Amino acid sequence: MRRSVYRFRDYTIQPDRRLEAEPYSFTMQCAECGDFSEPFTSGADGTAWAVTHLKANTSHLAYREIITRPYRFEPGAWQ
């Protein structure tokens, strides 16, 4: 009969700061109608979209910013 040996490893999740990581992105969404901007690499571009959307829809006063930030698990010590 064969005997199996199992090894476990700890992992830590953290923001992916490697050079090859995908960039952060910022999207603005209108809380009134659900319309949203395309993803931007800067939060300032998203607020510009919200201003343009407000000019076209003067009763749409509530917005939310959706930030996409890549994360990565880093392998730790074997147990």
Image (tube, rainbow, N blue to C red):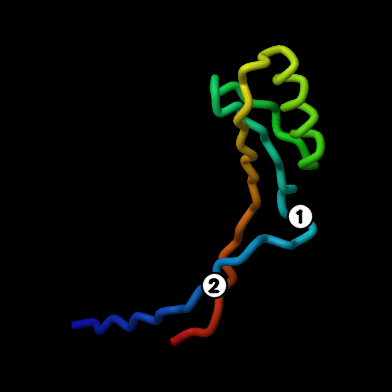
For image coordinates 71% across by 12% down, the residue present is 56
For residue 24, above or below residue 38:
below
Q: Secondary structure at mark 2?
A: strand
* Residue lying farthest to the top in this orientation: 56
The quadrant in which residue 32 appears is top right
State left or right for residue 30 relative to residue 1: right
For residue 24, above or below residue 55:
below
- Quick one: 16 or 33, which is closer to the camera? 33
**Which of pointers 2 and 1 lies earlier in the amino acid sequence?**
2
The quadrant in which residue 27 appears is top right
Screen quadrant of the C terminus: bottom left
- Quick one: 56 or 26, which is closer to the camera? 56
The quadrant in which residue 74 appears is bottom right
For image coordinates 25% across by 84% down, the residue present is 3
Query: Badge 2: how crowded within 10 Å, few (<14), some, or many (20+)?
Result: few
- Quick one: 42 or 76, which is closer to the camera? 42
Screen quadrant of the N terminus: bottom left
Q: Secondary structure at mark 1?
A: loop
Q: Which mark is residue 20?
A: 1
For image coordinates 72% across by 27% down, the residue present is 50
State left or right for residue 32 relative to residue 23: left
Picture coordinates of residue 8, whole percent (x, y) = 41, 79
Picture coordinates of residue 59, whole percent (x, y) = 62, 17
Picture coordinates of residue 61, whole percent (x, y) = 63, 26
Indicate the amino acid at tag 2. Answer: Thr
For image coordinates 80% across by 34% down, the residue present is 45
Q: What residue is shown with label 2?
A: 12
